[in-house]
Image (cartoon, rainbow, N blue to C red):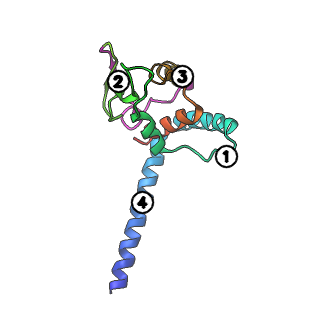
Amino acid sequence: MQMHKSLSAAFTVIAVSLLSSLVALAAVGTAQQAVIDHYAAAAKTTDPGFKGFSVDRGRAFFLAKHDANADTPSCSTCHTADPRQAGQTRVGKAIDPMAVSVNPQRFTDLDKVELWFRRNCNTVLGRECTAMEKGDYVTFMANQ
């Protein structure tokens, strides 16, 4: 009887893990996946050992503090620490949530994504973002 309970608990843990993974994958639409694939191809050209993007690295990048600009030391300065919430620019203009679960149109147009990365990376980091940083960021936001 005890072994049956242990097996049942183990199967429950596995089922919950699989379901969580499927929900995360379902959040990434075809258009977002095309953007992620674009950054993966770029990352592979600069790092032949590229193994894929990381939600955790994307989260860390989004929340990290940088020294390039005291007014905007982090992505979360304007976008808030919770990407499911609306943000605000330094001049008070509203910014729609970054999380794909709340704003499914996010990260669907590569040209638009590139435009905002170019602007915001230079503002926050003082440089362009790498393909790895962009891919991790989009992967994080697509799973929020």
Foreground of the two, 118 or 30: 118
Q: Residues within 10 Å of mark 3 (few under 14, many from 20)?
A: few
Q: Residue at x 39, y 28 (%)?
A: 74
Q: Residues within 10 Å of mark 4 (few under 14, many from 20)?
A: few
Badge 2 is on which residue?
A: 78
Q: In which quadrant is the C terminus drawn?
A: top left
Q: Could you say which disc has been placed on residue 49 in the image?
A: 1
**What distance separates the C-alpha of mark 1 from that of mark 3?**
24 Å
Badge 3 is on which residue?
A: 127
The kind of secondary structure element at disc 1 is: loop
**What distance separates the C-alpha of mark 2 from that of mark 1?**
34 Å
Q: In which quadrant is the N terminus drawn?
A: bottom left
Asked whether, in this view, residue 37 is left or right of residue 126, the answer is right
**What distance separates the C-alpha of mark 3 from that of mark 4?**
38 Å
Confirm whether the magenta stretch covers residue 82.
Answer: no
Q: Are marks 2 and 3 in contact (CB under 8 Å)?
A: no
- Start and end of the magenta stretch? 92-112
In the rendered image of this protein, does residue 26 appear above or below residue 9?
above
- Quadrant of res 46: top right
Q: Are marks 2 and 1 in contact (CB under 8 Å)?
A: no
Q: Residues within 10 Å of mark 2 (few under 14, many from 20)?
A: some
Mark 2: amino acid: Cys
- Quadrant of res 101: top left
The kind of secondary structure element at disc 4 is: helix
| First reached walking from the N terminus: tag 2 or tag 3 | 2
| First reached walking from the N terminus: tag 4 or tag 1 | 4
